[in-house]
């Protein structure tokens, strides 16, 4: 029975897709979409004789980069290439692809990342000013791979591509949950595949200090539970990122978010110790004491070491969410403020950040801070990273700051890919001069990890971040949401070859949740629910801590419930044109699946107590699907619903909005629309 | 249609399992089975109040080990434990589990690894002499976890457990294909879960030199393509293994298998250079020159560095597969042999190994070598690792050598778990004295990696190595193959929580092979085929090299084709008792699935050229399944087959034995049995 249900799901999706793209479904799925694409006639067929030559003056990183690209090509096709291992400038006699690079790229903001790619039936040509551009072009080249039943080919085309923003980043918080090296490495590969170029590492927090510090070893020894990166690992990571054209920006968050510093060095804090590593989530009061000279002596030595270790010209110093509580409670700090005419905590933070800025000037670093640093800082040399307030972007740009936008790209909040995709880096209604526009360096998606572990982090980052990467790279007129989702599916599949676990770990979690039983009913359920969004989990959850369970249904569910999305499109399309009866049939088949699913899922729940928390939500899915089915029947037969039924149905739908197991049903709005439609026929 | 077929498969497996274990299916699935288990009445129910106390004098490694165990428990149950992070000797007031350890275990052969575990409804008690025993006991504790529809519990029991052999190892070849740190780490966790205690790393080969060497940096700089472990990584790995009670034995293979050494140091070789890293598979001639004093000066300095880096008292020096060709071809070596009365290459290797042994005496290491070192070596201090010859084990033991057995445990040869499981470490017909028995330290499974990459290595090691680990740990009277497979399924599922990718990467490879289409038909096919066994792939394959495609069907197929195994059991059981008509029904339903599968799979093949190589094998599966179906029909109706049909059928079956795509069909023998049965009714 369960399996029969699955058949319907698959059939329905296929049916819907063929409706959506009937006749002219594009085979090529770029992501991000290049600036300029022209298709030409004639395909380049791939076989064992395929051979690449490199000309020009590329950075040596291009050789292994090219080897990796060829290896992925071999993995996708099974073809045994003879020219598959590039250790130096290859000049094979019968080269069929030419890569031409003028010079080695510098890993710095505003470097030339453009490329052009030409495919004819005889030859592929990739040309770029820098190897960074060439590496982007090689990713586009792989995205061009296509096949028919006879073999593999690249469609004839001419592409010219250049990014919209020079700073295209992903922040990973390795403090709330530590992320082993391989998590960062595989995500760096994923970033490169979608042409992101900045990995922002959030390295110190209340919950952990994550880098070995040779100057003050108690920072990592006492502040990390043994979970930190050694200097050698950081260097390994930087080399790995550099090899893929990605800059690494370290963030050590001061003066707040700093409990873990104080475990080893309580003398830095505004209140006396002892301190312990924070094991819960939230905004905490421990804050560096900005009034003592020895604080700055410590920070100078510390930032000196870290400025040497991390080689990018930018350095992030946090600066967010200072509650000021511990400053208020320290009489010495009050005295200091009075003596130095510092009127309030904002001014005190300004003083602190001024002192910190001076330290970084010595070490030739530009500093970046969260938007809170802007209101206090008088120096427009600090780069402002927006995250919370609506008006910050405009205010900062008008004041002359350079800006990185993260507001709208907080992927930990579990909004859909569509939500982030439709949020442009520069709001449509914001009028900026050319100069002001240039002050917006770019944007960063942020992966905060309170509810995220090495096991499911990839499913929080991917595939959504590929859609966000398109927003950062492609022209702002690339904004067809359905086509984005079509291409995102392909990208998601392709990202697996880089070792990313977003798909496979999800399946593994379902196996664990069902106690290794048949996962079909749970899969049907999970495809229509999403975990609670924003910070609701804090309010409505258990007392989450570092080692709590992060393998529950909500942790396996993703921010893009697939069936719910397709269902919602079907309903909207039908409402837009009620002559399309075929759409209504597909709607009905979805509803039928959901109506029947609880009877199956309850069996699994009985065998796996971990699933009990979603039992009533699963039951509600059956109830609302039954209502939807009745509505569809009435619509089909042009029968107007009686008011009593409508009232009861809407009440049931309303009640089903309540979260259970920290998940919510994503099919309620379209079902409400169907119910509403029964009133107006 | 495809989905309907799947229903049959699942139904058939469930049906068969209920036949096999009707009524008294054991819920507990130990692996390896403990020496002594007694079940008692009363279960210990698990809830949030569960708290552990530690008493005695354990090694500090037990605290994080216990944290990891609790974390896995939380992952399996979703329960928020309050006592979940063990950083020191915890003494919670309401402890419900007591772990008592007398002393810190030493990571050395013959350390006490025993433990006892008692579960009552009120309390769990784990007692061990050493923390190594306690860690084994904690794995058994996790294997005891059970549930009903109300929640989770541990069945009341008393267990006393001690290993059969002190040396229980897994060799991983990181040379043919380099294995990143995380591959080794997750496999160390897997090893600990099945109570293995030795990781043998094969670190140098013709194809790569994999450890940073500070004394002779050209070894790793020129011999590794940049793929090697730094000293810091090796130390990190040793610490990781130590924390899990696992010793690490390094192997640097001399005097042959050493091409990669000569890329940087051609002066060590028996023939002049230059040398390049070998990129193909096989047995090659480059060999260290044993006649020059500077060879030993080099080896002394080299082994000194490595003896300091690797902290185990054992060190493996290889010594296998010296072709002697380059010695024969070097006139200076011939002169040396004449001058020193060395009659042949065997004696020359003996001379070389004697010199190497002396070096290791200085550095207080015991040396291990492959069986070839025995015939020449006069020193019984060398530990012999058997791998090829039948008689070596007995010969070595009689001569007084200590022995590690790898013959029969070459998991790269792609034999089934059953095959290895039924191969005892000590052959049944071998009569040994008690002293001789004790000379057999234990055994090692060997994962050579010519055809194995980081992507599929876990599926080559697991779950088979869990069955092998049972062979190394449990009494030799634990040998019920079907029960082993039942427990192996559970173990395979549980091993996923350690990050092992044997299941999930297999699914990913199917997605890639089908070009992200429906994998059902390919899954049905792959469940009845196995990759070519032994070294047949060398003869029958393409010219495999380091970067060839290792993502084809044969690389996704495993050594235990599940449906084929169950089908074979069904046929055998029916032949043993032809009154069991229900078995024949299940046989028929399998055959029906396979008969229909090609019609589906061919559609997938048309969309994914990588699959073309298995097209005719898939077609043959349909043909032989049709024959099987006809045979079943005749058997059911007690109709004797005509000779012509039998002859043609057997010929078709014979022809289907031919490999295609380096895979073979595993259902031919049972179908032949059915055909044969039609003749004798």
Image: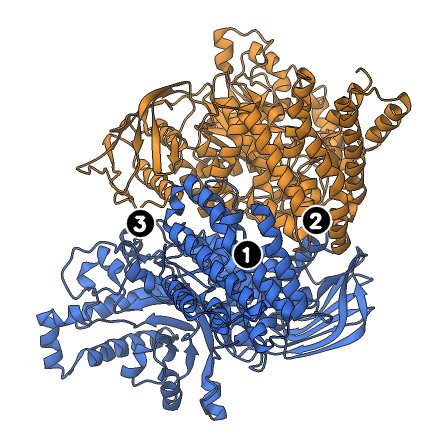
Chain colours: A orange, B blue
Circle 3 sits in a helix, a strand or a loop, which is it?
Answer: loop
Q: Chain of mark 1?
A: B
> Residue B571 bears which disc, if any?
none
Kindly identify which residue carries mark 3: B225
Q: Are marks 2 and 3 in contact (CB under 8 Å)?
A: no
Corner quadrant of residue A594: top right
Q: Is residue B381 above or below residue B496?
A: below
Q: Is residue A156 above or below residue B28?
A: above
Foreground: B55 or A623?
Answer: A623
Q: CA distance from mark 1 to mark 2?
A: 44 Å
Q: Position of residue A336 (x, y in %)?
A: 70, 27
Q: Secondary structure at mark 2?
A: loop
Q: Earlier in the sequence, mark 1 or mark 3?
A: 3
Check disc 1 and report its element: helix, strand or loop: helix
**Which residue does the image show at 62% across and 28% down from the upper left?**
A319
| Residue B357 visible | yes
Q: Is residue B236 above or below residue A581?
A: below
Q: Nearer the viewer, residue A331 or A482?
A: A482
Q: Position of residue B468 (x, y in %)?
A: 51, 71
Q: Which residue is under mark 1?
A: B592
Mark 3 residue crowding within 10 angstroms, few (<14) / some (14–19) / many (20+)? some
What percent of the width, then of the height, locates residue B450? 35, 59
Residue reaching furthest to the right: A644
Residue B195 visible here: no
**Among the 4 quarters of the image, the one containing residue B436:** bottom left
Residue found at x 71% / y 24%: A345
Foreground tag (1 vs 2): 1
Q: Position of residue A646 (x, y in %)?
A: 86, 24
The residue that mark 2 highlights is A549
For the residue pair B565 and A530, the one nearer the viewer reads as: B565
């Amino acid at each position: 029975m369960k399996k029969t249900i699955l058949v319907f799901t698959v059939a329905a999706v296929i049916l819907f897709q063929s409706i959506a793209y009937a006749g002219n479904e594009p085979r090529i799925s770029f992501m991000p979409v290049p600036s300029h694409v022209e298709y030409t006639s004639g395909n380049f067929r791939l076989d064992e004789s395929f051979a690449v030559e490199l000309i020009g003056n590329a950075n040596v990183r291009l050789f292994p980069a090219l080897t990796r690209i060829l290896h992925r090509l071999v993995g996708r096709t099974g073809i045994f290439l003879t020219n598959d291992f590039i250790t130096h400038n290859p000049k094979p006699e019968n080269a069929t692809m030419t890569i031409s690079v003028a010079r080695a790229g510098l890993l710095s903001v505003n470097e030339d990342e453009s490329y052009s790619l030409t495919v004819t039936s005889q030859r592929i040509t990739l040309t770029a000013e820098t190897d960074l551009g060439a590496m982007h072009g090689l990713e586009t080249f792989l995205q061009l791979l296509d096949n028919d039943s006879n073999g593999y080919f690249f469609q004839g085309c001419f592409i010219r591509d250049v990014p919209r923003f020079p700073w295209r980043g992903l922040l990973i918080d390795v403090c709330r949950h530590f992320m082993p090296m391989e998590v960062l490495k595989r995500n760096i590969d994923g970033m490169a595949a979608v042409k992101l170029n900045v990995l922002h590492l959030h390295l110190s927090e209340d919950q952990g200090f994550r880098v070995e510090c040779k100057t003050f070893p108690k920072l990592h020894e006492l502040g990390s539970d043994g979970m930190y990166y050694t200097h050698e690992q950081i260097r390994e990571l930087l080399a790995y990122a550099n090899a893929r054209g990605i800059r690494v920006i370290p963030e050590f968050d001061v003066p707040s978010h700093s409990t873990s510093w104080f475990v080893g060095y309580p003398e830095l804090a505004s209140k006396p110790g002892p301190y312990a590593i924070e094991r819960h989530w939230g905004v905490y009061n421990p804050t560096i004491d900005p009034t003592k000279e020895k604080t700055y002596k410590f920070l100078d030595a510390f930032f000196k070491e870290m400025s040497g270790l991390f080689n990018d010209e930018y350095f992030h110093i946090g600066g967010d969410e200072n509650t000021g509580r511990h400053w208020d409670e320290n009489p010495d700090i009050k005295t200091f403020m009075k003596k130095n005419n510092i009127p309030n905590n904002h001014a005190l933070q300004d003083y602190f950040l001024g002192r910190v800025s001076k330290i970084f000037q010595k070490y030739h670093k530009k500093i970046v801070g969260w938007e809170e640093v802007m209101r206090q800082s008088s120096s427009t040399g600090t780069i402002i990273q927006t995250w919370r307030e609506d008006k910050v972007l405009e205010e900062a740009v008008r004041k002359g700051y350079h800006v990185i936008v993260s507001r709208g790209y907080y992927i930990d909040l579990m909004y859909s890919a569509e939500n982030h995709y439709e949020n442009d880096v520069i709001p449509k209604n914001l009028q900026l001069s050319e100069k002001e526009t240039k002050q917006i360096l770019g944007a960063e998606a942020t992966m905060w990890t309170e509810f995220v572990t090495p096991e499911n982090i990839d499913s929080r980052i991917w595939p959504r971040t590929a859609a966000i990467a398109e927003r950062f790279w492609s022209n702002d007129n690339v904004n067809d949401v359905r086509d984005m989702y079509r291409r995102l599916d392909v990208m998601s599949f392709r990202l697996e070859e880089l070792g990313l676990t977003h798909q496979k770990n999800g399946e593994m979690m379902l196996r664990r949740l069902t106690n290794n039983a048949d996962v079909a009913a749970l899969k049907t359920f999970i495809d229509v629910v999403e975990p609670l969004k924003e910070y609701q989990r804090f309010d409505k959850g258990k007392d989450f801590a570092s080692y709590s369970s992060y393998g529950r249904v909500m942790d396996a569910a993703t921010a893009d419930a697939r069936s719910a999305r397709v269902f919602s499109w079907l309903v909207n399309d039908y409402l837009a044109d009620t002559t399309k009866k075929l759409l209504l049939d597909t709607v009905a088949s979805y509803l039928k699946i959901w109506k029947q699913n609880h009877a199956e899922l309850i069996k699994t729940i009985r065998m796996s107590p971990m699933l009990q928390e979603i039992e009533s939500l699963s039951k509600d899915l059956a109830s609302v699907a039954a209502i939807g089915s009745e509505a569809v029947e009435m619509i089909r037969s042009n029968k107007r619903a009686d008011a009593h039924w409508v009232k009861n149905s809407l009440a049931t739908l309303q009640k089903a909005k309540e979260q259970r197991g920290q998940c919510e049903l994503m099919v309620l709005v379209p079902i409400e629309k169907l119910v509403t439609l029964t009133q107006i026929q």
